[in-house]
Amino acid sequence: NPAPVAATIPAPRHLPDAQTVTAVTHWTDALFSFRVTRPQSLRFRSGEFVMIGLMGDNGKPLLRAYSIASPAWDDELEFYSIKVPDGPLTSKLQHIRVGDEIILRPKPVGTLVHDALLPGKRLWFLATGTGIAPFASLMRDPETYEKYDQVIMMHTCRTAAELDYGRQLVEGLRSDELIGEMVEGKLLYYPTTTREPSALMGRITDNLSSGKVFADLGIEPMTAVDDRAMVCGSLAFNKDVMAVLEGFGLREGANSEPREYVVEKAFVGEGV
Ligand code: FAD
Ligand code: A2P
């Protein structure tokens, strides 16, 4: 007997700016990462974001800003995403599978780029939650290690499981063919939790203000002469970290006016 034919065969989709999903990893109930094909023409600077999405029920593209988590040299593009239960985009996006298509508008922008900082000796990446995404790109970019003697990745989440994507990425980097040697001894990783016991704990703001992170890593405190920082988290986090950085004498820069630190929102709103 012939195999039963599905009653409704979905019509082939032809999305505008379509890219095909090549991998999906679920990290927690609320976090996943995925990779898609990269448009040949897409050039971006590590740390930038693009608009991605799916076709909405109304037939119009439903797009959101997403940091590109993969480095500029990668053949594919990687994204690290929240799953907002009632979120217009992520309530659907969280169900994507290998072979599905997403929409990607190939116009990268953003402030978390090397060009927006004055030269320095140490570069700090300060992130909460999915705010690690732009640094997942920058940590894998050789330029980061060419420009700085030391790179310090501070990532803070409520629970240990929420740190897993970043932790695995840093561990993978150390054994990476392309970048492993550059990273060795240069990349310091300082993951902390705030609502679950783990090896290192506390908010980034508190660990910087108290000097705990400098003592734990055995490094000198921050100065405006040597240190540069990139910040990506919730609005409240960004605001509080900026005050701490200003306290060390660092000033906010931009593409048009490079200074000692730059900031970008990881999302708009209060968080989930
Ligand atoms: P939305 O209606 O967009 O959001 C609903 C609510 O969920 C928001 O009001 C907020 O309270 C909360 N929320 C949204 N995103 C987050 C988040 N990332 N973490 C915690 N709470 C959140 N999101 C990512 O997951 N990964 C990224 O790399 C990323 N990069 C971004 C870069 C920029 C510059 C900006 C402005 C936002 C970025 N976002 C990122 C957020 C993203 O644009 C969407 O908000 C998110 O995908 C949820 O979409 P949604 O339509 O499901 O819900
Ligand atoms: P805490 O648990 O002490 O609030 P959220 O999930 O709320 O976006 O928070 C992600 C992480 O960022 C949590 O570990 C949280 O710590 C921390 N955080 C939230 N707001 C701030 C802030 N204003 N300053 C420093 N850290 C913050």
Image (tube, helix red, strand yellow):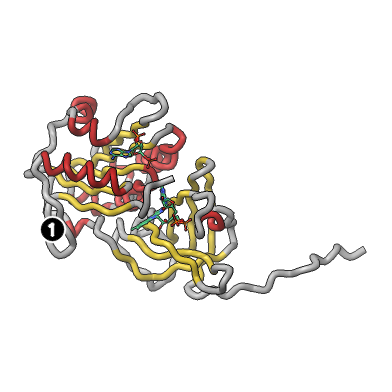
Could you tell me which residue is drawn at 29 percent across and 33 percent down? Answer: 203
- For label 1, the residue is 258
- Residue 189 lies, in percent from the top left, at 30, 36
Write down the quadrant of residue 41 in the picture: bottom left
Instruction: Note whether residue 193 is visible.
Output: yes
Is 114 left or right of 234, judged from the image as shown?
Answer: left
Write down the quadrant of residue 44 in the picture: bottom left
Could you tell me which residue is drawn at 33 percent across and 27 percent down? Answer: 201
Image quadrant holding the N terminus, namely bottom right
Is residue 27 or residue 248 the one in the foreground?
248
- Residue 248 lies, in percent from the top left, at 11, 39
Instruction: Note whether residue 182 is visible.
Output: no
Image quadrant holding the C terminus, namely top left
Is 9 left or right of 262, judged from the image as shown?
Answer: right
- Residue 103 lies, in percent from the top left, at 49, 68
Quadrant location of ligand 2? top left
Could you tell me which residue is drawn at 44 percent across and 60 percent down? Answer: 76
Is residue 165 or residue 212 the one in the foreground?
212
Is residue 210 or residue 122 the one in the foreground?
210
| Image vertical order of residue 150 relative to residue 41, above or below | above
Badge 1 local density, few (<14 within 10 Å), some, or many (20+)?
some
Could you tell me which residue is drawn at 46 percent across and 35 percent down? Answer: 161
- Residue 256 lies, in percent from the top left, at 15, 65
Amino acid type of disc 1?
Pro
Q: Residue furthest right?
A: 1
